[in-house]
Amino acid sequence: MLKQMFDRIEGNTGLLVALSLLIFSMAILTTVALPYFATNNYQPTPLAVKYTAQQMRGRQLYAQSGCWECHSQNVRLPESDIGTVHQPGDIGAVSHPGDYLYQNPTFFGQHRRGPDLMHVGTRWPSQEWMTIHFLNPERLNPGTWMPSFGYLSKENLDAISAYLMTLK
């Protein structure tokens, strides 16, 4: 029975093309169209930030330096007892889609080797502290894997720090 059905499909090129187009259309619908329409209705939250020129430059440097590969910017619900998180909510509120409305691309992180940076602007003392941290991470966080960014100019360090201060 099944063999006869497959033989019929293989023997009929038009049917084979029609089924292939149907499957391709369903794949496009589920991977492109549905997510597009689902995300079009998001409204910005108070955490969604339109960046200044300096902050945008810092965001670009953050991406170019590969910071997003080790640091996520998405607070998940089951955070308790993972890494630097000791109780739910101690690194800020859970993230919502509207938090990322003005971010393209969104830096959710790859392997999460470093701490989550979503609310880092409220956890770190100041922009100057961040600059010191970039120049000598081991000084402020003994045992860190983070490399020094001493090769960046003062202007670029200030730009990355300004970008990170928007993550509140």
Image (cartoon, rainbow, N blue to C red):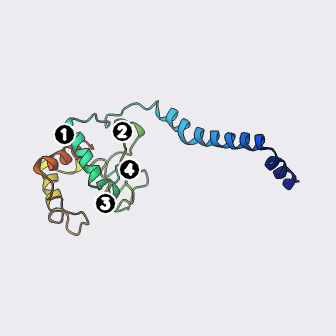
Q: Which one is nearer the viewer's eye here, 67 or 166?
A: 67
Marks 1 and 3 in Cβ contact (< 8 Å): no
Q: Secondary structure at mark 1?
A: helix
**Residue designated by label 1:** 54
Q: Quadrant of residue 33?
A: top right
Crowd around label 1: few <14 · some 14–19 · many ≥20 (10 Å)? some
Residue 129 locus on image (x, y percent):
14, 53
**Residue designated by label 2:** 99
The Cα atoms of the two marked residues, 1 and 4, are separated by 22 Å
Q: Is residue 134 left or right of residue 116?
A: left
Q: Is residue 16 left or right of residue 90?
A: right
The Cα atoms of the two marked residues, 1 and 2, are separated by 20 Å
Residue type, label 3: Gly
Mark number, residue 108: 4
N-terminal of the pair, mark 4 or mark 2, is 2
Discs 1/4, front:
1
At 38% from the left and 50% from the top, the residue drawn is 108
